[in-house]
Amino acid sequence: MSKLYLAESKSNDVKSQGLMRKLAGKSSIFPPGTDPLKVVLALITASRCQSCGKCTPCREGMPKLEMMLRNIIDGKATAETLVQFRATADLLANCADCAIGYQTGEEVLESLSLFGDQYLAYIAGKPAEKNQVHIPCVTLCPAHVDIPGYIAHVHDGNYADAINLIRRDNPLPTACAMICEHPCEERCRRNLIDSSVNIRGIKKYAVDQIAADKVAVPVPNPSTGKKVAVIGGGPSGMTAAYFLSLMGHKVTVYEAKEHLGGMLMYGIPNYRFPKDRLDEDMNAILSTGNIEVIYNVNVGVDISIEEVRNSHDAMYVAIGAQVGKKLRMEGADAENVFSAVEMLDQIGHGNRPDYTGKTVCVIGGGNVAMDAARSALRCGAADVRIVYRRRHEDMTALETEIESAIMEGIELMLLQAPVSIEKDAEGKCAALWVQPQMIGPYDRGGRPAPMNAAKDPERIACDIVLIAVGQDIVSKPFENFGIPANRNVLQAGLDTAVEGMPGVFVGGDCATGPATAIRAIAAGKVAAWNIDEYLGCGSILNCGVEAPMPKPNNRIPTGRVNIGERPAYQRKHDFDHVECPMTYEEAMQESGRCLRCDVCGYYD
């Protein structure tokens, strides 16, 4: 009988697990622009290390794939190599015993489909130029704000310079400090040490120290004599107006409501974004001096689009997505069934509904659903429930918003698909009927799709139903003008120009569908520069500030400073701002964690 031995000490296993976590951290921060072939090579190498080597496709195929891909990248391959590479990946995908093998083969085949031109370029001896020239946080910010630069200014106490550096690319620093979804943090290189820098929190600290409208904007260029119409005073329209004004163009903003801000004003509750803070950004934009705002004018209704276009040298359409989508289900016409978007709009106008003692059901799983539910609670509702047909992890709302809603006592009813609304004898909402769901295969959007479970429908008694299943665009007047649309989304190129309509540009939510404020801001910035180019001006702007040189930073693993909130038992009864300001010590520690990838190492 063979001898048996005790397993090796746990210490080695713990150490190897720690090493694997570090390797996983390296994988998770692949910067945007990374050569896809090198990503595939890293995948094959990692998979080869995981393989048990039991089946022939893995044992023989993976080393061959790795060798051939290295030859392709090194310029030592031929067209025949690529044929063999594809055949080996196909064999691995179809014959390997487990997912380590067949999934690797499938992903290599997918890379050949997606990046075939890169493979051919390497074989032809003309690989694409390196794309990895951008800082991850700046690249992932849709407006490409100089994030390390303004963080450095905050660390030095130069708050006005930080705001001006932000405004070089984004004229709404306060808005983004309050409600930005901070995609910039996703690939922060600080993750290699501990966790990403709290970029939004540092920006909020800056605008909390000095209001944006107290920081002088750059002096506009001399007048060009050109006139540009901007339809819509939301984040995209006002961003375009800001840059066009600084370029010396005369801008007329047509706003359908009595205040600027669009969904920032009428779609985001005061407890998340106080409206006096929105005024700080709007006042700063208007201080450029070349902007006239015409309020309470709905272009396409009160004034024709043709008249606006003909009286200006160019026109930018940024009407946003201002109306809520409806659900097609029985009983949706019952009294006390409302669009969540319209409910938030009413609150934004100062008309708070009275839900005292009511039970409210909110249908949806996005940020609008969270805002509607938390606002209903603040309007006196006794019980608020969010009904969603998918799982918690499939919700599109920010995790911080979901967590805040739960802390305030809002119940999540997950895997429940609304099927009908029950009416009472007076035609009012009496209950919401739902069909329990079970989770199934992944859909095209990359999320597991729900399907009906073998359970009976359930009745949820409620007094009010708020529908938060998306936003829609009032596109018909602009379609009649000649701007093409697809399912109410106005069609324009990546340069925001409308094909076949010189001088007409479209951007923001009305061109992409409902998205984030920072994406709308990015569209306004792109539109402004392209309108300036269309007008033949080629303007140059100078924000008057540069990023400071780097100083010694903190590379010791240090916990991330998160923004705190007022206790739930207090905040759920009012619309006062929920977030607490960072202290000086917190802001200095957090800003000191930035590794200054913009001037150190490869990026310099």
Image: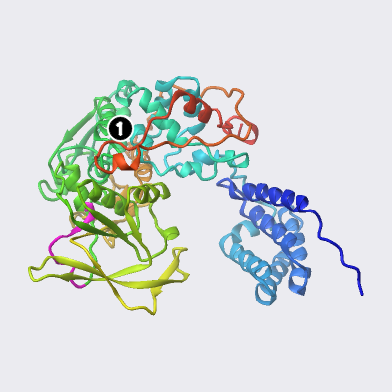
Residue 334 screen position, x and y as percent: 14, 66
Q: Depth check: give the residue in front, 182 or 574.
A: 574
Helix, strand or loop under label 1: helix
Say which quarter of the image contains residue 164: top left
Tell me if residue 535 comes above or below residue 246 in the rendering.
Answer: below
Colour pattern of the rendering: rainbow
Q: Is residue 124 visible?
A: no
Q: Is residue 337 magenta?
A: yes
Seen at 39% across and 76% down, the residue is 453
Residue 443 screen position, x and y as percent: 45, 68
Q: Depth check: give the residue in front, 199 or 544.
A: 199
Say which quarter of the image contains residue 559: top right
**Label 1 packing within 10 angstroms: few (<14), some (14-19), many (20+):** many
Tell me if residue 6 comes above or below residue 441 in the rendering.
Answer: above
What are the residue bounds of the magenta stretch? 330-341
**Label 1 amino acid?**
Tyr
Residue 519 screen position, x and y as percent: 38, 45
Position of 329 compared to 392: left or right?
A: left
Residue 80 screen position, x and y as percent: 73, 67
**Residue annotated with mark 1:** 242
Seen at 58% across and 24% down, the residue is 550
Q: Is residue 567 visible?
A: yes
